[in-house]
Structure formats: C-alpha cells, structure tokens
Amino acid sequence: MAIRFSSAGSEQIMTSLAAYFLALFGNFLLSLGFSLQKKYVSWLSAKRRGVRIKRGEIIGWLSGFTLMNLQPIFNYLALGKLAPNIVAAIGGSNIVFTIILSYFLLGERIPAGKIPWIALMAGSLALAGFVGQESSKQFQVEAFWTAFFIPTGFAMFVLLANRKMTPAQVGIFLGSAAGALGGFMVLALEALRMTRGSDFMSWIFSPYLYVYIFCGISSFSIKQVAFERGKMAAVAPSFYGLLVLYPSIATYFVSSVPLHPQQILAFLGISVSIILISL
C-alpha cells in the first residue's frame, strides 16, 4: 500500500544541496559529541579514583552529550528534500569526522594506511551528494514492516545461537544486526515525517516512534554483546557497513525511489571505505 504525502513549510524552501550539507553537518556534530565525551569522560570515575571532579570536564562531557542528541534533528530536516538512502549514506561520514577530530582533540594519530580510504570516503560522499535524489512522496507500509522485521528476526536468531559460533562469526553477525537496526532508524524517522509531518505531539501515537526507539536501544545493546563475545576486528566493519548499506537498499522498496547506478557506486565506495578504515 502506497501512501502519498506532500511536503510543506520550510521543506519546500530547502534545496537538495542545502539538505545534503545539513545532514553532513549533523553527522559532524555527532562525531564532535563523541570526541568531547571521550576527552572529558574521566570525571565519571573521579570519585572512585580519589581525585577532584573538575567543572570544566562536566561541562565538556555534557556538551558532547547534547551535540550527539542534536543529530536526529538535522536528519529529519534533510529528509524533507533527500531520499532516506542518501541521508543514511551521509552517516558514513561519522567515521572520518571522528578520526579527524580525534587527531585535533585527543592527540590520536591518523594512520597513513587509512588516508587513501578516507579519500575514497570523501569522494564517495561527494558522488552521493552530486546525484542525490529528492525525497519520495511515497511510503510503502508493507515494505517498511518487512524491512524492519528482517534485521529484528536476524538479530534474535543470532543472539540465541551465538554461543555455538566462533568470536569472528559473532562479531560479523551481531555487528551486522546492530548496524542494520541502527541504520533503519533513518527509515523510521522518514515514516514519522511522511505520516505525521511536523506535528511532533502526534508522534506519541505513531508506532513508528516506537520502532525508532526500539531500533536505537536494540542496536546499542546488541553492539555491547558483540563487543563482549565477538572479535572487535569483525564487529566494527560489519556494524558501520550495514549502518549505511541496509537503509540504502531498503529505501528502494520502502520509499519507491528510482535506482541510479551512480548512487550504487557511491554507496559501495562508502561501505568499502568504512570497512577498510575500521580494520
């Protein structure tokens, strides 16, 4: 069943290019938030270590927490002009922003071997933005729920069966499940935008809000299990790869967007660079 909606208000004004940079900026803020929390996280254990809690560290950590939680707002605004697969693909920029910010804020070096893959990521993101298609006015309800239950069912199966798997297999499968569910949050946000628009109070009565919350909590929790029982070298590439790839593919069915070969090339470039940067 296809549901058609028309964009309104500020969504009509924004251009696709502006929406692209808006989503990119949102991901930069997310990475900056991660980096600030990492830089000032020591205050959480200050009492246990017997040292004085510094107000500056609390402010820095809380600033990071705030920035991390601003990112969905930018995604929501970008979805007014861009298809969910483009917004999801832009999320791959997080790994590059985090590496660069870690260099400046945390003093961590950038391995020379990762520079070509960072360049590939930048080029692929530029290509995705260059051919970035505008958001669809269709929403396929059955396709949405199918796309939601596929990673959910897969995650449940792997969680039940992971005791019999090798650490590498656990890392790959649980990392993939966590990444797919995390990436699906973009489609849940798109579903809210398409069905409820900017009437945020009505979101409370929409099942898509709870899909969004479920995917966020599940992705985080499954990733922790993957860290504990899986091989880290397998978790990171699987997680970040599916974070981009799964919603990018699902969008073609959920939002009925046309297939562009250049986009497929861009998505593959983003996914490959994520995997090789993560290794």
Image (cartoon, helix red, strand yellow):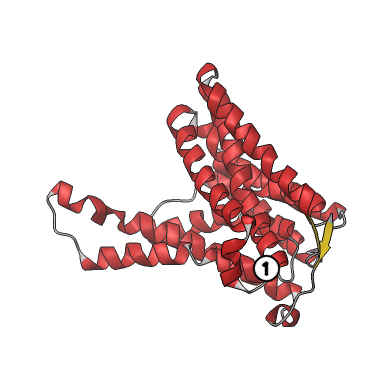
Residue 192 falls left or right of residue 146: left
Q: Which residue is rendered at x = 76% and y = 60% of the image? A: 127
The quadrant of the image that shows the C terminus is: top right
Name the amino acid, label 1: Arg
The residue labelled by disc 1 is: 196
Report x, y in % for residue 207.
63, 55
Secondary structure at badge 1 equals helix
Q: Residues within 10 Å of mark 1 (few under 14, many from 20)?
A: some
Report x, y in % for residue 159.
54, 28
Q: Quadrant of residue 14?
A: bottom right
Q: Which residue is rendered at x = 58% and y = 44% of the image? A: 277
Residue placed most toward the observer, 217 or 32: 217
From this viewpoint, is residue 91 visible?
no
Q: Is residue 244 above or below residue 234?
A: below
Report x, y in % for residue 106.
37, 56
Q: Quadrant of residue 155?
A: top right
Q: Which residue is rendered at x = 25% and y = 68% of the image? A: 56
Q: Residue furthest front?
A: 205
Q: Is residue 25 above or below residue 38?
A: below
Residue 101 falls left or right of residue 126: left
Q: Is residue 233 above or below residue 256?
A: above
Report x, y in % for residue 190.
69, 61
Q: Is residue 39 above or below residue 172?
A: below
